[in-house]
Image (cartoon, grey):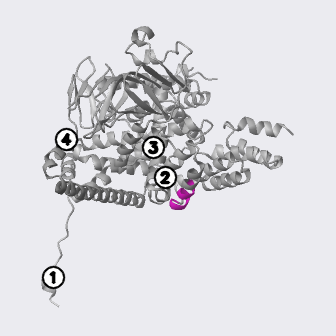
Amino acid sequence: MPSLKRLDPDAALAELARLARRDLVDTASPSEDARGWAEVRERLARNQNRSRRRAMTWIVAAAAIAVVLVGGIGMLMGRSKPIEYTVEAGTIDEGGYVRATGAAGPTIRFSEGSQVGFLPSSRGRINSTTRDGAQLTVEDGGAEVAIVHRPRAEWLVDVGPFAINVIGTSFKVQWSSAEEVLDVRMHAGIVGVRGPLAAGGITVKAGQRLVVRVRSGEVRLDPDRGEAASGVRDDATDDLGAAPSNDEGIIANTPRPQADRRATGSRLSEVRNWSKLLASGEFRSILSQAEQMGIESALSTTSRQDLAALADAARYSRRTDIAERALIAERQRFKGSVQAKEAAFFLGRLAEDASKLRDAVSWYDTYLAEAPNGSYASEGLGRKMVAIQKMGGTETARQVARQYLDRFPRGAYAVAATQLLDSR
Amino acid sequence: MDLGAQVVPLQRVPPSYESDAELGAALIRGEPAAAHLVWKRYAPLVRRIVKRTLGPGYEVDDYAQDAFLRFFTMVPSLQEPKALRNFLVAVTTNVVRDALKYRWVRRIMQPLSTEVSEKAAPGDDPSEREALRRFYKILDGLSADDRTAYVLRFIEEMDLTEVADALGCSLATVKRRLSAIHKRIFKMVERDPALVEYLTTRNGRSHDA
């Protein structure tokens, strides 16, 4: 076999990059481009109308309050101002990115007394501030977070794919994107953590330490023995990659506290972006928002991406009833789109889980006919083969197995297909 | 009919705003034609970045539209009109990173899914198609941030400062990170016999005798 070690790495990767540059180009026709712009314009107009309606509602409400509480106007105006902040040992650019100006990590001091100190070499940003709190992101590295407890405080710290809801508390959080490990050490108060492997939300209290190792699927909630005792350093990668040192950790998957739910609900009502929530593992937030607006209304009015996110959130949370309706709605409302085609595959998965194998095969056939080269073509064909075999149609299953091996000789179901053909 | 007094109606010529500084300033002022001009000027770039980051076979239109929507709502924070392009690229990068994380959640929730590996790549030559598919399968092993950085630098061929701006990190961090990613990808390429064979046969720069 030829050896790549004799090739220049730069030349080898340059060749692959060249292929990508040559084949992955913008292929939109003028009419597709025009359609794209029309859709953007329409969505912008919808957003502006929503903002205007929201603004009008606020104006009416503010006027009513003004009539009743004339003397309180000044105070109310003052309260509606977002909290302010200053940065020490760093700067913030127009995108909200926090940059260190020296070796030490920058510290952000908020006007109501809270502060967030990024650890050295960490990356993060301030996404938004409101009168009640802020939304921050720690992209890599870590931060010491100290939030002053106030009524209605709403703080959200996004850490890698995780979201931490905070009311009033102090904790240290670290995320290693290289190792995909989250480490939360609670000094005081309580937080709710959501994300991969923590879809239902995990409550972490003062004196506890939560470590989530995404790759190995491990979630540990232990008493925090302190940095000296556990040998933790500020270097997130070194520390977080290490194996847990005791076996007393408990795997926790507790319901989200009421206060967290309130905080998230309020934040998300401002901007509905269910795809983003789904990426953060906030499946329950998506479902609860959909329930708040009415499932029927959610199915008939949400955007294509939000509807797909709702269907996924329902599937991951085992809410089969909502998942099925969302998938059907995707097919009806966005006929011909990638999401509509993929919905057929997922309807097959739901039918298969409910042991309705005939229905499952029918949905897989639909998907394979609509998207023969789609994302789930290999899996759809493989699952069809297995479902037919389970129904006792061994001969038909063998025909599907041949078809599978022709198309996907190295696919996930290749071994099963080969075994089926060899079992004559 | 008085042909001698023919009236030629004046047509409104839309402004062209040739430089980004002019276009950015017009956008900030809220001039009606500016948004469409931004789309016309940069939609191909945005679609290309999305396509090259997500890989072969993915629908790009929705993500490109999301990038523009997010960009237009963030225009008030565009302080330097001439930084219009960099700002849009940074917003697009964020949208694509969200999409990659979303895809990553799907993979976690459906470990058997072969979503990316079986995607069809464009191109006429089957060996090149297969090589490209395998290359993107390797990129699937990178984090969303690393993948975006790699694509912007080596496939989109942006310069290092543009990549740093798009990712919101320092030049030194980008250099260090890209060097590590480059080595990591090459190691993964080495472990793929089909790619090794393709590159050895195809690449005239081989040192093999």
Which residue sits at x=20%, y=70%?
Answer: B11
Find disc 2 in the rendering and name its residue: A307
Find disc 4 in the rendering and name its residue: B80
The image position of residue A8, as x and y in percent, is: 48, 22
Dots 2, 4 in contact, CB < 8 A: no
Share a chain, discs 3 and 1? no
Which residue sits at x=75%, y=37%?
Answer: A416
Query: To which chain does the residue with label 3 belong?
Result: A
Mark 3–mark 1 Cα distance, whole angstroms, equals 67 Å
Q: What's the magenta region?
A: A327-334
Q: Nearer the viewer, mark 2 or mark 3?
A: 3
The secondary structure type at the circle numbered 1 is: loop
> Which mark is drawn over residue B6?
1
Query: To which chain does the residue with label 1 belong?
Result: B
Mark positioned earlier in the residue sequence (4 or 1): 1
Mark yes or no: residue B52 visible.
no
Find disc 3 in the rendering and name its residue: A285
The image position of residue A389, as x and y in percent, is: 78, 45
